Amino acid sequence: MKKQTLLLISLLSFLLAGSCFYAATRYIDALAVERLFAPVVKVAEGKQIDPFEPITQDDVVLVQEEVDEILPGSLQTLESVLGKRSSQTLYAGEQVLKHKLTDTQLLPEKGEARYEFPLTFIDPITELRKGDRVKLWVKYKPPAELEHLPEPTHFRKTNPTADLLFESRLATVKDSNGTEIYTLKPSMLPAPDHMDAVFNGSREKPLLNGEKRYRDYRAQPTALTAFIGFNLSDQQYVTLSEAMMYGTIQIGQISGAEERTP
């Protein structure tokens, strides 16, 4: 009887010691993870976040990263990232840094106002995205069409072909139903069945609010691209309006190298 009691006590002691050892090991591991790792928001695998396009649930992931590898200013919750916009391209696996995000929604600065123009007056020469820095040029009409016009007042005509007017930022792109979109490609002649949409707007019923995928902050285009907008000073607006009398306004994206040039 005594042997059985001793054996039972020994077995219980062994199980208790094993449980304590297991719990202590788990605690030490959890403590090590807490001290050595921390959550950080990264761009999801296979994704790329373009400048000024709203960040969606599918664009980012929350991962545990070694503390020594976390960059200063890295964001640690998805809620602090979703719906915001990056001021530059973010690539897969890159940590999302606070100073790269913006909440400004491309609002006009002091002394500026938002002006929107139909694409019938403007010719994009590169693919553009909302938020891109752009150059605006006037490509002059043939000399025979200009000979009866006076010299421009608000800009100088220095080249018989085209002149640079100023630089700005593409603040808005809308389709012919007024829906906000984000990408503008160089203009091509639309297919014949799309010509009616260019001149009269789409005959399709615009999407309801619930159909615009507000879950990921993007709106679906409901027709062809029709309007673009800039935040301009009064002087820039007058210059652009006058230049439209002398030719076609061309816009092109400023390359990263040009933006870095002081």
Image (cartoon, rainbow, N blue to C red):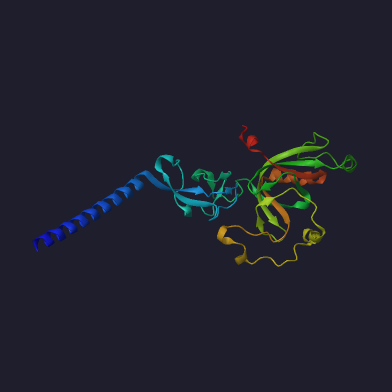
200 relative position to 67: left or right = right
Q: Is residue 29 visible?
A: yes
Residue at coordinates 46% horizontally, 45% vertically from top-left? 74
Q: Nearer the viewer, residue 148 or 6?
A: 6
The C terminus lies in quadrant: top right
167 relative position to 13: left or right = right
Question: Residue 16's spot in the image, x, y percent?
Answer: 21, 56
Residue at coordinates 66% horizontally, 55% vertically from top-left? 181
How many numbered discs, if any?
0
Question: Residue 86's spot in the image, x, y percent?
Answer: 56, 47
Residue at coordinates 22% horizontally, 57% vertically from top-left? 15
Of all residues, the one furthest to the right in this rendering is 144
Q: Nearer the viewer, residue 111 or 50?
A: 50
18 relative position to 210: left or right = left
Q: Nearer the viewer, residue 30 or 260?
A: 30
Of all residues, the one furthest to the top in this rendering is 262
The N terminus lies in quadrant: bottom left
Question: Residue 250's spot in the image, x, y percent?
Answer: 76, 44
26 relative position to 91: left or right = left
Of all residues, the one furthest to the left in this rendering is 2
Relative to 84, is 164 above or below?
above
Question: Residue 214's spot in the image, x, y percent?
Answer: 58, 61
Q: Is residue 87 visible?
A: no
